[in-house]
């Protein structure tokens, strides 16, 4: 359900969402070095590397990982793509560098603790709290490999290409004939024949049986760890065989109860702090770029609220669904989220009392407004179970509330309050 809500919020489209906000937010993502450690547990070949969090660790790690040219790869660890072409807020170019060992600490000092801005990070960028030092590889070929969930078959699908190193969209445009798709029966699993089909499609030149074992290992990882995606780009070939030169792994939040070790790896520093706080109270929140804060119960109603705000000339500051049975504690937490955002210049509360009673939510609104101290216009629209009692509570409170008769009236009053 959480995934559906988040996808629904993002479907507002370019009217309100920035590229950074359009990223997948509700699924767990982990850093490259963490993914490499996890893949190695499944027998998947990964580059030798070491994660460091202090400058004192850099030189010893660089010396241990130096190649025959005495060089090492230094990679910024952030949860966003395009690191190599990114730029630090300091002006230093590139989040990935190949450097001589004796220059490793100097370069690392320009990266560690900085903020890296990439095409996927958004303008604010992401903090680089960890660097991943890796041995430079002699890659003979680069390929593409991914396991995703296919809605048509309701099961996993493997997408592979004998070309790699760039996005699958670009590969599909340039080399459509080289794209291999293999649907996997979730009950049977990946068969040996299917693994060999993928290996053949990749055009593997080294031991095909060993390559098939790598494909099987990637599939086991996908299933056993409740992945939503395993993308290896590039899946490289060296003289010794296949190696996952870089990988992006995503995990299903619904499986957090059985993947506790994985979800303990979540890096809150890479997320919007408002979303981290909302998650503590089981609120569905996504920050947007408008000025009208929204608190609504139900994903569909939230979408309708944002659409009508846009229709009336305003712009929503967030998607915030408190759910169908929100407690007063959740309502207070929601108000704190909204009022802590400096771009919120008005708050629109739109509640339809079905499972949730309007009198309960009205009491929550009044108490929350008193606790938080709302200093912006507060527009409230209530409808549904015990609506008259709810309106009485709002009317008799000493909180400055602008009452609305319906959703269109609420949106109009919210937009007017900004003028």
Image (cartoon, rainbow, N blue to C red):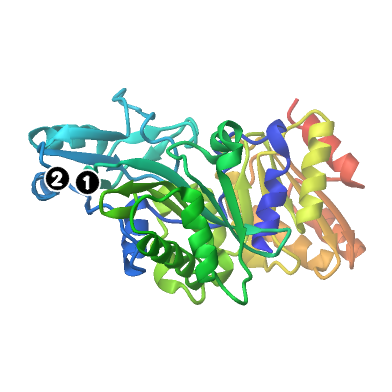
- For residue 207, the mark is none
Quarter residue 66 falls in: top left
Q: Which residue is mark 2?
A: 58
| Label 2 SS | helix
Decide if residue 2 is on the left or right side of residue 175.
Answer: right
Q: Which of marks 2 and 1 precedes in the sequence?
A: 2
- Which of these two is toward me, 346 or 3? 3
Quarter residue 87 falls in: top left
Kindly identify the residue that appears in the image at 29 percent across and 46 percent down: 129
Kindly identify the residue that appears in the image at 85 percent across and 55 percent down: 382
Q: x%, y% of residue 88? A: 34, 29
- Spatial CA distance of label 1 from label 2 is 8 Å
- Which of these two is toward me, 59 or 101? 101
Work out whether residue 413 can be spotted: yes
Quadrant containing the N terminus is bottom right
Q: Nearer the viewer, mark 1 or mark 2?
A: 1
User: How many numbered dots are placed on residues in this image?
Assistant: 2
Q: Are marks 1 and 2 in contact (CB under 8 Å)?
A: yes
- For residue 133, the mark is 1
Q: x%, y% of residue 32? A: 36, 51
- Which of these two is toward me, 99 or 317? 99
Decide if residue 299 is on the left or right side of residue 72.
Answer: right
Quadrant containing the C terminus is top right
- As displayed, is residue 37 above or below residue 12? below
């Amino acid at each position: 359900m959480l995934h559906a809500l988040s996808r629904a919020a993002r479907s507002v489209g370019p009217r309100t969402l920035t590229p950074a906000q359009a990223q997948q937010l509700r699924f767990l993502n982990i850093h490259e070095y963490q993914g490499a450690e996890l893949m190695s547990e499944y027998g998947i070949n990964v580059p030798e590397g070491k994660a460091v969090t202090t400058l004192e660790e850099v030189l010893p790690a660089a010396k241990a990982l130096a190649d025959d040219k005495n060089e090492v790869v230094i990679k910024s660890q952030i949860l966003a793509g395009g690191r190599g072409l990114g730029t630090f807020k300091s002006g230093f170019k590139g989040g990935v560098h190949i450097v001589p060992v004796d220059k490793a600490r100097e370069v690392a000092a320009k990266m560690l603790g900085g903020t890296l801005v990439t095409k996927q990070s958004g303008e604010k960028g992401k903090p680089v709290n960890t660097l991943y030092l890796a041995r430079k590889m002699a890659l003979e070929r680069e390929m593409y490999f991914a396991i995703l969930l296919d809605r048509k078959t309701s099961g996993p699908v493997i997408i592979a290409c004998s070309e790699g190193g760039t996005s699958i969209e670009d590969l599909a445009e340039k080399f459509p004939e080289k794209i291999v798709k293999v649907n996997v029966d979730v009950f049977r699993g990946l068969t040996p024949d299917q693994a060999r089909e993928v290996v053949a499609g990749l055009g593997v030149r080294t031991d095909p049986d060993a390559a098939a074992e790598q494909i099987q290992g990637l599939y086991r990882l996908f299933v056993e760890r409740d992945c939503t995606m395993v993308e290896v780009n590039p899946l490289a070939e060296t003289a010794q065989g296949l190696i996952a030169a870089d990988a992006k792994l995503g995990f299903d939040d619904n499986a957090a109860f059985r993947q506790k070790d994985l979800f303990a790896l979540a890096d809150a520093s890479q997320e919007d702090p408002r979303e981290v706080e909302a998650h503590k109270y089981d609120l569905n929140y996504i920050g947007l770029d408008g000025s009208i804060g929204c608190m609504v119960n139900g994903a569909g109603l939230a979408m309708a609220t944002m659409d009508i705000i846009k229709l009336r000339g305003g712009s929503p500051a967030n998607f915030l669904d408190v759910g169908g049975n929100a407690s007063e504690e959740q309502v207070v937490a929601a108000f704190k989220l909204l009022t802590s955002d400096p771009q919120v210049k008005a708050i629109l509360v739109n509640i339809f009392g079905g499972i949730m009673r309007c009198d309960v939510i009205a009491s929550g609104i009044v108490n929350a407004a008193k606790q938080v101290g709302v200093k912006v216009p507060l527009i409230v629209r209530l409808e549904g179970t015990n609506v008259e009692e709810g309106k009485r509570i709002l009317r008799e409170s000493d909180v400055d509330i602008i009452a609305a008769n319906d959703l269109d009236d609420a949106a109009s009053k919210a937009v007017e309050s900004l003028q």
